[in-house]
């Protein structure tokens, strides 16, 4: 018996030593605690080895000391190990300080035993005819047991609580160690009561050390992993189906069951259901396929992914199919696409998308002849101003609806911006009579308000050479300018004449700088008379004496330069010329004024006030002799800051005149706020009115109104004596028109107005 147990103990010591070394080398944080515990288990076994193997009383006594003190070491290491092992579960992190003291004092009382005889003595007993040493427990031994058992039970309790608190799948990790501790403890107790000389529970201790080593450092909780993986699979938002190598479904998660409408236990029918839904998952491995299902109520989109699972030697273990519902994402993308390509208000294509669609249509139908149509609402600003934005929006929706209803699938249409729309229509589908008929009665009724919309279409026939869609629409737009009778003509075509006009525009634009430098462009003066017919001033009007095209009136170049912004070059030149003339006149004591025109575009390209002020001071001109003619359109944008500018002119002594009054629409409304000194009433617009008496009434009232506002009235376009007389009678103070004289060169004007006489 002695030899057998000696061998067993020696084996255990060797095994624990090995475990200690391996645990020390482990990278796991628990490694050093396992090493400490396994190492601490060696002394009690060595102690017992000495007790059973020795025939010397002294050696047996030494064995007892090693055994008892070793047990305290085991407790100490066990407590440290427990604190680490149960870390993170909220248990065992803090070791109470008295524990160390208890173990220290216990060790001390054991060490003092040779002097105190308080703990134990040694006796000899005979077992199976052999002498063995056995310790006889005294008072100190009871204290020792009390401390070690107390701590041991506390540790077990801690493991138990941790095992209870921890999620079920982790319980195994604690309960196995708890179980081993329990067995080792029970074995030890058995030894204490059996009073045999050999402590067989040391085998339990040794095995406990080995198990701790195994479970802490080597064992991978496969069941735990299994359960974790199956939980992940069950809780996945995607539907998951697992098939065996014969393609029979062996498992499906809840989402999979819901998708195929099968009961969780009835996975056998999943394959058939999947086939019904998607036509079978039989596809090459690891590729994604998008499927669309119409389930009677709605359309849903899915991505199917089939993966194969292989085991050793690439043997097929099965497949799994992952079905991801991408309906929401798909819808979101569709919605975003729609929003990016469709106008919010009308639901038609945006300009960019329309251009894209037109390009595609043209490319796909090279043999079809198309028109590009530019749809423009006349005076839409008036609609908004008078009826409000809500009405305006409704009107735009009606137009969009009208376009939508009238166009076939072969057409493309969209909103180009603001009140303009664009359409691509095959020539054979374009029916001008029908469209004109519809446009002639386009009445918008909304909340008790009614307005007859005036819509014009500019049409451009696409040429085989054309490629730039915006150019096509520009040309269709240009055609609109040719509509003369805007109330009866609704459609205008881009033709050769317009093409010539464009070429003309490009031509003279290229020549303008040279023309100004070479003085081909020069000021003409048109006299302005007072009520007695005396010439009091003149309006400076630009003329171009073109070397190739002869004498050009402003109508042939001013609108072009107004459009491309080059008007500012002419105006600067005209302002300077007016200052030169005024300087000359001032020198000879002539006090006549000159009015200069200011285009609305000038404000975009230059600081008009600063520039004119600068010129006046450069030429030493009296500002009151330089009159500034602006039109109401100047006020269309940024009215507040433009008002400030006019105020600025007046503060500096310039006279501000509002030109062409009556040709716009908001004149009366604006007049009360406009800081102007003179109102130039346009007689030409009255020429349109068939009834002369009505025209007279309008002019009379405008003159009266200007008087009330403290503004001087000037009528332009006075062509005969009758007009002059009647306007004088109405209270008009200044007159301009062919009746007095047409615009003329400066020298001619000076003779006409008698200025040259002053100098003589
Ligand atoms: P506006 O400023 O209203 O100038 C008056 C126009 O009416 C002048 O035409 C003048 O010749 C014309 N007119 C004067 N009396 C009569 C009349 O009794 N009967 C008729 N039928 N017409 C008369 P014009 O010189 O052809 O200028 C046309 C427009 O071109 C001007 O209208 C003005 O808006 C613009 N313009 C002319 N020169 C300049 C310029 O230097 N700068 C700018 N920005 N615009 C200019
Ligand atoms: Mg003018
Ligand atoms: Mg005018």
Image: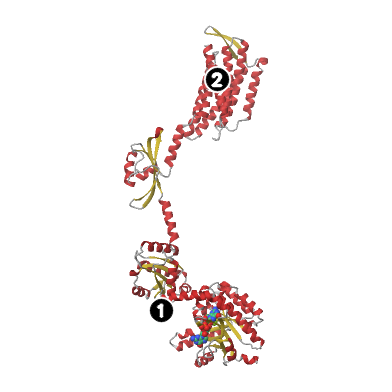
Q: Nearer the viewer, residue 251 or 183?
A: 251
> Residue 627 in the image: x percent, y percent?
60, 82
Q: Position of residue 187 (x, y in %)?
A: 52, 19
**Above-or-below relation of 38 to 467:** above
Which residue sits furthest front?
548
Neighbours of disc 1 within 10 Å: few (<14), some (14-19), many (20+): few
Residue 663 in sight: no
- Indicate the position of residue 471 as horizontal and vertical percent values: 44, 68
Q: In the drawing, does residue 458 fall left or right of residue 669? A: left
Q: Earlier in the sequence, mark 1 or mark 2?
A: 2
Question: Residue 340 falls in which quadrant of the image?
Answer: bottom left
Q: Which mark is residue 689?
A: none
Q: Position of residue 478 (x, y in %)?
A: 44, 73
Q: Nearer the viewer, residue 62 or 641?
A: 641
Q: Which residue is mark 1?
A: 487
Q: Secondary structure at mark 1?
A: loop
- Asked if ligand 1 lies within 8 A of label 2, the reply is no
Which sits in the foreground, 518 or 337? 518
- The residue under label 2 is 14
Instruction: Decide if residue 256 is in sight here.
Output: yes
Q: Mark 2 and mark 1 in contact (Cβ < 8 Å)? A: no
> Label 2 crowding class (10 Å Cα cut-off): few <14, some 14-19, many 20+?
few
Location of residue 733 (image quadrant): bottom right
Q: Residue furthest right?
A: 115
Q: State yes or no: Cβ of the residue under disc 1 lies below 8 Å from any atom of ligand 1.
A: no
Q: What colouring method underlies this structural image?
A: secondary structure
Q: Nearer the viewer, residue 103 or 369?
A: 369
Report the quarter where the C terminus lies: bottom right
Regarding mark 2 in the picture, which secondary structure is present there? helix
Measure how far apart labels 1 and 2 are at the Cα level.
113 Å
> How many marks on residues?
2
**Ligand 2's quadrant:** bottom right
């Amino acid at each position: 018996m002695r030899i057998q147990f000696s061998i067993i103990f020696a084996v255990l010591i060797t095994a624990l030593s090995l475990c200690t070394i391996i645990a020390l080398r482990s990278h796991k944080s628990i490694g050093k605690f396992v090493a400490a515990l396994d190492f601490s288990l060696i002394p009690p076994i060595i102690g017992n080895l000495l007790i059973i193997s020795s025939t010397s009383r002294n050696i047996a006594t030494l064995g007892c000391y090693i055994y008892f003190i070793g047990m305290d070491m085991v407790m100490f290491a066990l407590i440290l190990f427990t604190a680490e092992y149960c870390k993170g579960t909220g248990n065992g992190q803090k070791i109470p300080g008295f524990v160390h003291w208890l173990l220290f004092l216990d060790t001390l009382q054991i060490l003092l035993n040779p002097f105190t005889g308080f703990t134990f003595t040694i006796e000899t007993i005979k077992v199976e005819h052999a002498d063995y040493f056995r310790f006889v427990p005294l008072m100190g031994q009871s204290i020792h047991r009390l401390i070690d058992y107390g701590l041991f039970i506390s540790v077990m309790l801690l493991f138990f609580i941790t095992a209870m608190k921890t999620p079920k799948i982790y319980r195994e990790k604690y309960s196995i160690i708890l179980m081993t501790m329990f067995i080792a403890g029970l074995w030890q107790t058995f030894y204490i009561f059996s009073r045999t000389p050999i402590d067989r529970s040391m085998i339990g201790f040794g095995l406990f050390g080995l198990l701790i080593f195994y479970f802490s450092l080597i064992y991978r909780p496969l069941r735990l992993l299994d359960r974790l993986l199956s939980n992940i699979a069950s809780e996945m938002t995607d539907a998951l189906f697992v098939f065996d190598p014969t393609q029979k479904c062996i498992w499906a998660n809840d989402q999979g069951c819901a998708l195929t409408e099968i009961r969780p236990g009835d996975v056998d029918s999943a394959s058939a259901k999947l086939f019904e839904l998607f036509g079978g998952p039989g596809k090459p491995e690891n590729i994604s396929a998008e499927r669309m299902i119409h389930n009677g109520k709605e359309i849903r989109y899915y991505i199917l992914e089939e993966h194969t699972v292989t085991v050793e030697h690439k043997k097929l273990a099965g497949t799994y199919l992952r079905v991801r519902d991408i309906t929401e994402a798909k819808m979101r993308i569709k919605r975003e696409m729609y929003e990016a390509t469709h106008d919010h208000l009308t639901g038609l294509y945006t300009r960019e998308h329309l251009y894209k669609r037109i390009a595609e249509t043209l490319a796909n139908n090279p043999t079809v002849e198309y028109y590009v149509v530019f749809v423009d609402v006349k005076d839409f600003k008036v609609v908004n101003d008078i009826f409000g934005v809500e009405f305006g929006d409704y009107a735009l929706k009606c137009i969009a609806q009208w376009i939508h209803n009238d166009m076939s699938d072969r057409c493309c249409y969209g909103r180009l911006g603001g009140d303009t729309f664009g359409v691509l229509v095959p020539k054979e589908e374009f029916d001008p009579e029908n469209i004109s008929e519809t446009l002639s009665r386009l009445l918008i009724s909304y909340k008790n308000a009614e307005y007859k919309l005036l819509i014009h279409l500019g049409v451009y026939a696409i040429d085989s050479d054309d490629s730039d869609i915006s150019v096509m629409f520009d040309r269709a737009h240009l055609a609109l300018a040719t509509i003369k009778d805007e109330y009866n003509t609704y459609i205008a075509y881009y033709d050769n004449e317009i093409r010539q006009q464009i070429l003309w525009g490009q031509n003279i634009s290229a020549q303008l700088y040279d023309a100004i430098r070479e003085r081909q462009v020069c000021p003409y003066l048109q006299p302005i008379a007072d009520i007695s017919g005396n010439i009091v001033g003149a309006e400076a009007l630009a003329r171009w004496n073109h070397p190739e095209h002869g004498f050009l009136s402003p109508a042939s170049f001013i609108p072009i330069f107004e459009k491309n912004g080059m008007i500012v070059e002419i105006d600067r030149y005209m302002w300077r010329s007016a200052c030169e003339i005024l300087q000359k006149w001032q020198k000879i004591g002539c006090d006549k004024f000159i009015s200069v025109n200011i285009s609305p575009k000038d404000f975009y390209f230059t600081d008009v006030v600063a520039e004119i002020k600068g010129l006046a001071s450069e030429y030493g001109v009296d500002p009151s002799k330089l009159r500034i003619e602006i039109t109401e359109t100047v006020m269309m944008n940024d009215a507040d800051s433009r008002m400030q500018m006019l105020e600025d002119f007046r503060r500096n002594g310039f006279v501000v005149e509002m030109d062409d009054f009556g040709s716009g629409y908001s004149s009366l409304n604006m007049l009360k706020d406009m800081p102007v000194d003179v109102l130039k009433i346009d007689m030409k617009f009255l020429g349109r009115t068939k009834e002369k008496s009505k025209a007279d009434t309008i002019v009379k009232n405008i003159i009266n109104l200007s008087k009330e506002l403290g503004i001087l009235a000037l009528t332009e376009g006075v062509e005969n004596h009758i007009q002059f007389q009647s306007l004088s009678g109405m209270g008009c103070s200044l007159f301009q028109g062919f009746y007095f004289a047409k615009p003329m060169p400066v020298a001619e004007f000076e003779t006409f107005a008698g200025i040259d006489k002053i100098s003589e």
